[in-house]
Image (spheres, helix red, strand yellow):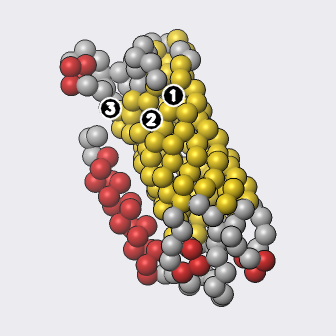
Amino acid sequence: MRGGLPMLARTLAIAGLIAFIAPGALADDEDSFVREAGYLAISGVGAFEQIGKSLEREVNPSDGGGLSVRAGYRMFRYASIEVEGEWVYELGSGLKNPYNITCNLRFYYPMGPQDRIQPYALGGIGVSVPNVNGDNHVTGGWRAGVGVDYYINEHWSVGPSASWVSTVSNDPALAYVSVQLGVQYLFGASEDEGGL
């Protein structure tokens, strides 16, 4: 992944340090940050291309950066559903500027004071559109990953995530690791009206 794992490890270590040093610093009571509500999120993306060793001599693999936007709804304490659009600039190997739109399910395990720390696993299917040498190709796509949301207050959270993103077809074949760091806004009732 050409440096992707050390960057992810540092990001997760910093998020963990914040989570355990400052819980409760921004809230006055013990209400949970978990509640049924819609949310919007935006993240920066680091994309680390994954191609077989046999192809590295034939193509010009390179990593890229991009943007992810999500809109979803927290259905109950342990799950939410969302739509995610992700665009990556200059991923390389002839697959320039791919974008993916997936419908994801997230499964949470809220923990810590007031459920401030919310690790999750996600999986989703959708459409992948790699640009192959100047031509857009539409094919099926999927993603699977893990992450954590850390709630700053009742509406705002930040956190890292990492997902494997791939097409379902071999022509065009696209696979990369998406490492994200983003911010999320949770709509809905204030924390003094109760959580889930």
In the picture provided, is 67 more to the left or to the right than 160? right
Image location (x, y in percent) of residue 62: 33, 30
Label 2 vs label 3: CA separation? 10 Å
Disc 1 secondary structure class: strand
x and y percent of residue 26 in the render?
Answer: 60, 81
State whether residue 185 appears in this view.
Answer: no
Three-letter amino acid code of the residue under disc 1: Gly
**Image vertical order of residue 87 relative to residue 11, above or below:** above
Provide the residue designation for mark 2.
165
Secondary structure state at the residue bearing disc 3:
loop
Determine which residue is flagged by label 1.
Answer: 141
The answer to whether mark 1 and mark 2 are in CB contact below 8 A is yes
Please provide percent x and percent y for residue 55.
Answer: 25, 19
Question: Which residue corresponds to the image point at 59% horizontal and 64% vertical from the top-left?
Answer: 157
Q: Is residue 9 left or right of residue 39?
A: left
Q: Nearer the viewer, mark 1 or mark 3?
A: 1
Q: Residue at x 72, y 62 (%)?
A: 36
Three-letter code for the amino acid on which mark 3 is drawn:
Gln
Residue picked out by circle 3 = 50
Q: Is residue 180 above or below residue 90?
A: below
